[in-house]
Image (cartoon, grey):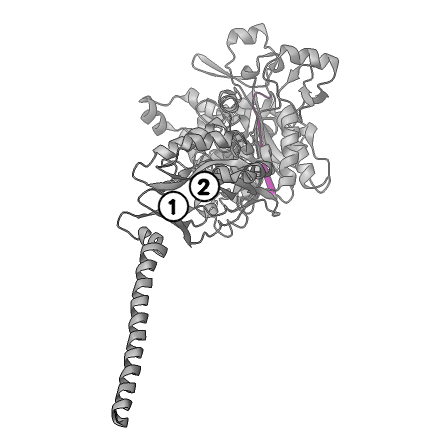
Amino acid sequence: MKNKSQKYLENVISKRFFLLSILKGVVVGAIGWRFFDLQMIENRKYEKLSDENQFNFYMIAPERGRILDRKMRLLAGNMDGFSLVLKWNKNINVDNVIKKILKIVNISKKDLNNFYDEIKSDKKVFAKEILITKKLSQKDVSKLAVRSIEFPEVNFLMTKKRVYPQGILVGHITGYVGPYSKKDTKIKLKSNTAWFEIGKTGLEKYFDNDLRGTFGRKRDEVTSKGHIVASQVYENTISGNDIQTSLDMELQAFAVERFEKGSNTLVSIHDDNVKKQIEKLKNISYVNQDYVYKDKKNRIVNPQSGSLIVMDIENGEVICCVSSPGYDPNIFSNDLEIDVWNNLKNNSRAPLLNRSMSGVYPPGSTIKMAVALAALENGIIDYNTKFYCDGAKKLGESTFHCWAKDGHGKLNLIEAIEQSCDVYFYELGLKVGIDKIALMMKRLGLGQYYNIEINDKSKGVVPNIEWKLKRDGLQWSMGETLNASIGQGYLLTTPLQLTTMIARIANGKFSVTPTLLMNQNKNKFEALKINPQHIGFIKKSMERVVKGNNGTARNYQIGSKKIEMAGKTGTVQVVRISEAEREKGLIKNEDRPWKKRDHALFVGYAPASKPKYAITVVVEHGGSGSSVAAPIARDVFKYIFKV
């Protein structure tokens, strides 16, 4: 028999064996479970981390900043839209996926071409998300969502579409955005660039970095077979900054309508006589699709072409900037059809040209104040110096005519500006010389670029002796001085430069420079450095142009005791008139082909007693500056001052 000690020992051993067996079972079970977990459950996770897997990185476009007018009205903004994206890898039959989609919704040929180009763009990538189209409607999304099980490789994304609520009114200023290309920007984007749009023209281009904001980043984890197994955003986007312009859209809308009308009349296209004329004409522009313009001879005509600018003379803020004809930047936010683009590009009136900044024109008589100031500042004449005008100035074998065939008689300087006597300024130009005239023109803002917020702008031409020698290798002639003295010949200016010149004269103290932004030019101007008495005399002369008995713009006064404008008219010959044509009798401007008619110009400021705004009106082939451009300026000032 076992004693108590033996029984106790056996009992302890049995318990320990049992516990060890349980522990062994737990350990073996845990190891078995781990093997199962590694082989079956976590297989996908470790497949991702295998050496054959890769990470693809993508940039995410931020929401673009808005462009606003001076009263915070929207000029350019963003509208919600829907995009269709393919989660592409090399194992997907792309053609089959696209065929299924096209049975449900329409996708433009252009979008499909871009899509296939993107697939071919980076052969090293296993997989990536590729934009199919960003032009889905809510209805399209609904149709595709119902049948989404048929193409699991496709995603829908909420995107932003650029919109321009003011359309054609400010198309040249806002510009437009378009698809990114490597030549457009210094920023180098890798794949999937069809997502990104950048500014192509106007403010959109100039402020592209500010408006664009900061890109986010996304990472796709891709298997060796090309399947996207995880996607993660790990850097969020930062929206672009808003840009507030100095433009006033109420004034802009009025100015566009008034400028395009010119001296013509609006008539309905439903009138039988109008219908008959339209049937015989080509390339006629419609106003609101129901009206056209008719001139004084009852001929159907296009809206006036040219530019109108209004600038604050104290801070250089451009509050109105019209370039006609214009274009609607919204067409570039949609799928721009090739025929629409060709119509824009091949239009004889060049609607894509920003005439206010890039258009160059001989300034004509609007430049005579600069010639007068050059003479006064150099002590060559005084206020009472007189010259005799008999209608022409002979120089060698050439004859230079005044616009007044029978001449103006004997005139002093203020009378010469009031009546715009060409012969007086021929005489003045010969005495002053082209170099001194050119220096004064540049001091007043001509022949130079400004830091205005537009990339597309012209410098114009302010010629002098050195310029001619350098360009042509020829000496400057006195006849060329005569032409320059009345704003013709080699001399070319932009409407923006003419407005700046008038702003500096009206201000009288500072070399004002233009800006398209609010509060941009505070206390930044250099001194004008022109004798204030001479400036005062020129301003008095410009008042006489409008209020004087013989003033060339006397028929177009504002008519208010408190508000009146001062200015200078200009009429620029586009085609040289021969002596034979003069003897035979000139054909009236309105009877010539449109492209052979004179340009009509007016520059001025208001109120004359306490200047606030400068204005320039350039009507291409409009005829007389006195009868066409001056009344437009008057009406714009009446609108501004609520007269």
* Camera-side residue of 207 and 627: 207
- Residue 81 makes an appearance in the image: yes
Q: Quadrant of the N terminus?
A: bottom left
Q: Which residue is mark 2?
A: 206
Q: Position of residue 309 (x, y in %)?
A: 57, 35
Q: Which residue is mark 1?
A: 228
**In this picture, is 303 found above or below 101?**
above
Amino acid carrying mark 1 in the image:
Ile
* Camera-side residue of 293 and 16: 16
- Left or right: 253 in relation to 174: right
Q: Position of residue 370 (x, y in %)?
A: 50, 34
- Which secondary structure class fits the magenta region best? strand
Residue at 47% over, 45% down: 529
- Residue 186 makes an appearance in the image: no
**In this picture, is 405 found above or below 523?**
above
* Camera-side residue of 541 and 125: 125
Residue at 33% over, 41% down: 126
Q: Earlier in the sequence, mark 1 or mark 2?
A: 2
Q: Position of residue 363 (x, y in %)?
A: 51, 27
The stretch of residues the image draws in magenta is 613-622
